[in-house]
C-alpha cells in the first residue's frame, strides 16, 4: 500500500522567510502528485499538481514543488511567505494508472503559521 | 457556480443510530470520494466511485455504506457499526483522479 509522509507537523515562520515543506511517498510505480491547501475557514483546494514532464511545477500564489523521483519526494517551496499563507498543507499521491487513478493517499498535513 | 455541496455542516447523532451525510456536485465529474479527517491526521479514504452504480471500498470502509444512483450524488451512511464515528467528513470529486480533487466544505459529525 502506498503511504505519504510529511515530516513537519507545524512550521512557524516570519514574513519574507523562505519555506520548504517536505513530502515523501512510498510507491514504486508511476505516480501523480499533489499539494492541497486549507486556509482557515475555507475548503481544501488544489495548490499544484505533477503528472509528467518538467519535475519543477508551479502553482498558485507563488508556490512551486519539485519532484525528485530517486528520492520519492515532492517538496513544496515558496521563496518568501506572507501572513496570508498561514494554512494547513497536505501532500497527496495517487497511482498513475487508469484503474486506481482516483485513489489518493494523503499525508498527515503540515500547519504553517506565518508571523507578521 | 459549480461546486460540491455537503450537508448538513454539523450533525449530532445518538449512539446506535445510523446517519446519512449528503454530497452533491454540479461539476459533471465522474469520480466522487469520501474521506474522513481526524485531528492531527491526514485524510483517510472511506469509499470512492468512478462511475454511476459502482463504488469501491477505501482504507477504512468498515461501518460505512454508500450509494451512487446518480452522477451528481454520493451519500454516505455512517452506521451504528462504526465504532468511532465522531470526525470531520469530506466529500470530493474529480474528472478523473489525475486532475486532482474538488472538495466540499465538510460535515462535522458528533456522536453524543
Image: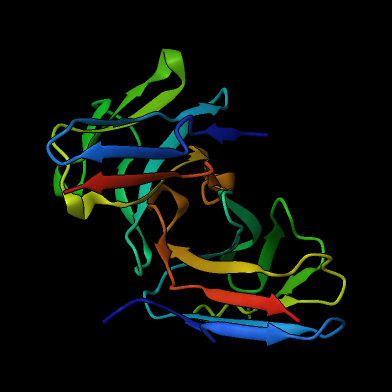
Taking the spot 60% from the left edge, 64% from the top edge, the residue there is B49
Looking at the picture, how far across and down is residue A97, in whole percent? 52, 39
Q: Nearer the viewer, residue A113 or B25?
A: A113
Taking the spot 46% from the left edge, 21% from the top edge, the residue there is A72
Q: How many marks?
A: 0
Q: How is the image coloured?
A: rainbow
Q: Is residue B82 left or right of residue A62?
A: right
**Residue A50 shows in the view:** no
The N terminus of chain B, quarter of image? bottom left
Q: Nearer the viewer, residue A114 or B70?
A: A114
Residue B36 position (above or below residue B104):
above
Looking at the picture, how far across and down is residue B54, in whole percent? 67, 67
The quadrant holding residue A17 is top left
Looking at the picture, how far across and down is residue B20, in whole percent? 68, 84
Looking at the picture, how far across and down is residue A79, in whole percent? 15, 31
Q: Is residue A78 left or right of residue B84?
A: left
**Residue A16 shows in the view:** yes
Residue A37 position (above or below residue A67):
below
Q: Nearer the viewer, residue A48 or B27?
A: A48
The C terminus of chain B, quarter of image? bottom right
Residue B110 position (above or below residue A72):
below
Q: Nearer the viewer, residue A13 or B36?
A: A13
Taking the spot 64% from the left edge, 67% from the top edge, the residue there is B87
Amino acid at each position: 500500500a502506498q503511504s505519504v509522509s510529511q515530516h513537519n507537523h507545524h512550521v512557524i515562520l516570519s514574513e519574507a522567510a523562505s519555506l520548504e515543506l517536505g513530502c515523501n511517498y512510498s510507491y514504486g510505480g508511476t505516480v501523480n502528485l499533489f499539494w492541497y491547501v486549507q486556509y482557515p475557514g475555507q475548503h481544501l483546494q488544489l495548490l499544484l499538481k505533477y503528472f509528467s514532464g518538467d519535475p519543477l511545477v508551479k502553482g498558485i500564489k507563488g508556490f512551486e514543488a519539485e519532484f525528485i523521483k530517486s528520492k520519492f519526494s515532492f517538496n513544496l517551496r515558496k521563496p518568501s511567505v506572507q501572513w496570508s499563507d498561514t494554512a494547513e498543507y497536505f501532500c497527496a499521491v495517487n497511482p498513475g494508472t487508469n484503474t486506481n487513478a482516483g485513489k489518493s493517499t494523503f499525508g498527515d498535513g503540515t500547519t504553517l503559521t506565518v508571523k507578521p | 457556480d459549480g461546486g460540491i455541496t455537503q450537508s448538513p455542516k454539523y450533525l449530532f447523532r445518538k449512539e446506535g443510530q445510523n446517519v446519512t451525510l449528503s454530497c452533491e456536485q454540479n461539476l459533471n465529474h465522474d469520480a466522487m470520494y469520501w474521506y474522513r479527517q481526524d485531528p492531527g491526521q491526514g485524510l483517510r479514504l472511506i469509499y470512492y466511485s468512478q462511475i454511476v452504480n459502482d463504488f469501491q471500498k477505501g482504507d477504512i470502509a468498515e461501518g460505512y455504506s454508500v450509494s451512487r444512483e446518480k452522477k451528481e450524488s454520493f451519500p454516505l451512511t455512517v452506521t451504528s457499526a462504526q465504532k468511532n464515528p465522531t470526525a470531520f467528513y469530506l466529500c470530493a470529486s474529480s474528472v478523473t483522479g489525475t486532475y486532482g480533487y474538488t472538495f466540499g466544505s465538510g460535515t462535522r459529525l458528533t456522536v453524543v
